[in-house]
């Protein structure tokens, strides 16, 4: 048996662990060394339907539970994760290949988010307002939608799970979570902790499996009232189309092609530091990663030299002494290698990286060297398509106005960053860039539990998670009017 998690990972349905009929399963392998970590149950439409039925049965009880009491149960759930934070982080590190310290930081972030939403049970933010009619008051209250189908990505697995389940649950919905097939044990241990913490059976259900076999049936199930998805734009479009047919609610947090701008008055040390972190931390597997670096032409050569030199010094591996780990699977590795090859064939210039590491320490893993290119056309594939790995492109801009033009010349609009000492430039940048998030003198990524996150264009459908704005995803607003009858006073 693996010392971190069991040999076989199952579903959590109605408070118990279940497995696919016929012993259908698949292997979860380590992206670090290719070793099999565990066997995972391979759910299909039947197992998904079972989970949805369990969620539907539990919904009347959970939706009628006082929101403050729901919050108290979710607080116990969050504290259960905190009590086992090192165990959870060990699973995250094993499944993703990221460093233990990074996995622990991600776990702590998930706990903070869980505690934030547990506290929302004391608020839920209805509204009291005025009426235009004498003797009449007006207010709104929030009510749950029903069953929430949640589909998460594997890049930051424990954070992604918390990001979805806690706002859905505090609003009074019951949940069916489709775990990412590359991080099944992270979802599994969350289900285990929920059981021990006393979350009622059927309130949180977790199904394992592949997207087409388990995710699609979840979206298509008519008993699912809201779907929240984090992943690729192509899959998001299909989900939106399916949900539109039954007028179901859907929240989509999709891709990004994020730009970091370095102005001629930037603190160069700080700009290089954040460009490295934005492009290459988590092996570039962030929807908010900086895959485009836009530098004023007067600073371009200096920045390029320092950035490339720093990238060449980055260490790849799964330990706390390494700067980045592997990408999540071999298919992803091969996809980004092909993207770089096509860019080079189209005239791009490779400054460093561009291929997988195949030495003794990395040959069985999914390690892509930190890759920097230049002379990529603004209309070329690598300027427009999300690669989701440690691959970034340098662009030269004449001035601030061209830099903003390059930032906005993208089908995506998730995040952007600018490095400058000018308050005037930062103000104009905030106003003009077409993104949902702007960072000043920092990286392109980052969100906090109380802040909304999301983007424009192909980066999403306009919803926001987390923050209190996520309550709008998982609840309905009901108007309540009260008329005072003077004769009865």
Image (cartoon, rainbow, N blue to C red):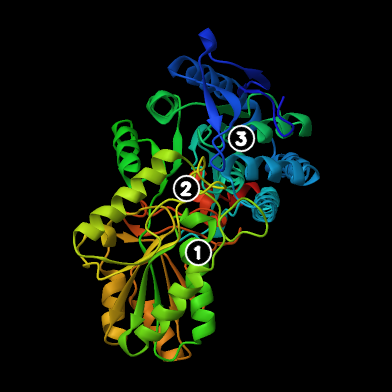
Helix, strand or loop at disc 2? loop
Residue in the picture at 48% in, 90% down: 421
Tags 3 and 1 touching, CB below 8 Å: no
Residue at image mark 1: 445
Which residue is at the far front? 360
Front disc: 2 or 1 = 2
Which residue is at 68% across, 22% downward? 15
Viewer can see residue 476 = no
The Cα–Cα distance between marks 2 and 1, rounded to whole angstroms, is: 29 Å
Provide residue 214's location: percent of width, then percent of height: 44, 25
User: Which quarter shows the N terminus?
Assistant: top right
The x and y percentages for residue 454 are 44, 57
| Residue assigned mark 3 | 187
Q: How many numbered marks does the figure carry?
A: 3
Mark before the other along the chain sequence, 3 or 1: 3
Q: Residue under circle 2?
A: 358
User: Who comes first in sequence, dot 2 or dot 1?
Assistant: 2
């Amino acid at each position: 048996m693996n010392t971190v998690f069991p040999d076989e990972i199952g579903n959590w349905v109605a408070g118990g662990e279940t497995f696919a009929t016929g012993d259908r399963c698949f292997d979860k392998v380590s992206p670090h060394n290719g070793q099999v970590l565990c066997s995972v149950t391979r759910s299909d439409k039947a197992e998904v339907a079972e989970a949805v039925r369990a969620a539907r049965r539990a919904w009347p009880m959970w939706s009628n539970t006082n929101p403050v009491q729901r919050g108290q149960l979710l607080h116990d759930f969050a504290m259960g994760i905190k009590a086992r934070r090192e165990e959870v982080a060990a699973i995250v590190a094993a499944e993703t290949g990221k460093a233990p310290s990074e996995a622990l930081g991600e776990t702590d972030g998930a706990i903070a988010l869980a505690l934030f939403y547990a506290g929302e049970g004391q608020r839920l933010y209805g509204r009291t307002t005025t009426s235009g009619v004498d003797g009449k008051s007006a207010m709104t209250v929030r009510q749950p939608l029903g069953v929430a189908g949640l589909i998460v990505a594997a890049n930051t697995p424990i954070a992604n799970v918390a990001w979805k389940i806690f706002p859905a649950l505090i609003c009074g919905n019951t949940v069916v979570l489709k775990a990412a097939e590359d991080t099944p044990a992270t979802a599994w241990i969350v289900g285990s902790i929920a059981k021990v913490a006393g979350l009622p059976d059927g309130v949180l259900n977790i199904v394992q499996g592949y997207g087409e076999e388990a995710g699609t049936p979840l979206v298509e199930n008519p008993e699912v009232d809201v779907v929240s998805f984090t992943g690729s734009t192509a899959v998001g479009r299909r989900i939106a189309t399916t949900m539109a047919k039954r007028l179901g609610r859907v929240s989509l947090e999709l891709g990004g092609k994020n730009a970091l701008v370095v102005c001629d008055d930037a603190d160069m040390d700080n700009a290089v530091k954040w460009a490295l972190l934005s492009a290459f931390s988590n092996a570039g597997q962030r929807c908010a990663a900086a895959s485009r670096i836009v530098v004023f032409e007067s600073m371009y050569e200096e920045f390029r030299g320092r950035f490339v030199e720093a990238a060449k010094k980055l260490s790849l591996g799964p330990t706390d002494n390494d700067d980045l780990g592997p990408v999540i699977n071999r298919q992803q590795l091969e996809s980004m290698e092909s993207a770089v090859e096509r860019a080079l064939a189209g005239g791009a210039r490779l400054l460093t990286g561009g291929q997988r590491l195949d030495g003794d320490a990395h040959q069985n893993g999914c390690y892509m060297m930190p890759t920097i290119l230049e002379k990529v056309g603004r209309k070329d594939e690598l300027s427009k398509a999300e690669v989701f790995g440690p691959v970034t492109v340098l662009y030269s801009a004449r001035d601030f106005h061209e830099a903003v033009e390059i930032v906005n010349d993208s089908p995506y609009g998730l995040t952007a960053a600018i490095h400058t000492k000018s308050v005037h430039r930062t103000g104009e940048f905030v106003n003009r860039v077409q993104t949902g998030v702007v960072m000043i003198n920092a990286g392109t990524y980052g969100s906090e539990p109380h802040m909304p996150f999301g983007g424009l264009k192909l980066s999403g459908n306009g919803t926001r998670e987390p923050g209190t704005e996520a309550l709008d995803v998982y609840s309905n607003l009901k108007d309540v009017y009260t008329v005072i009858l003077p004769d009865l006073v």
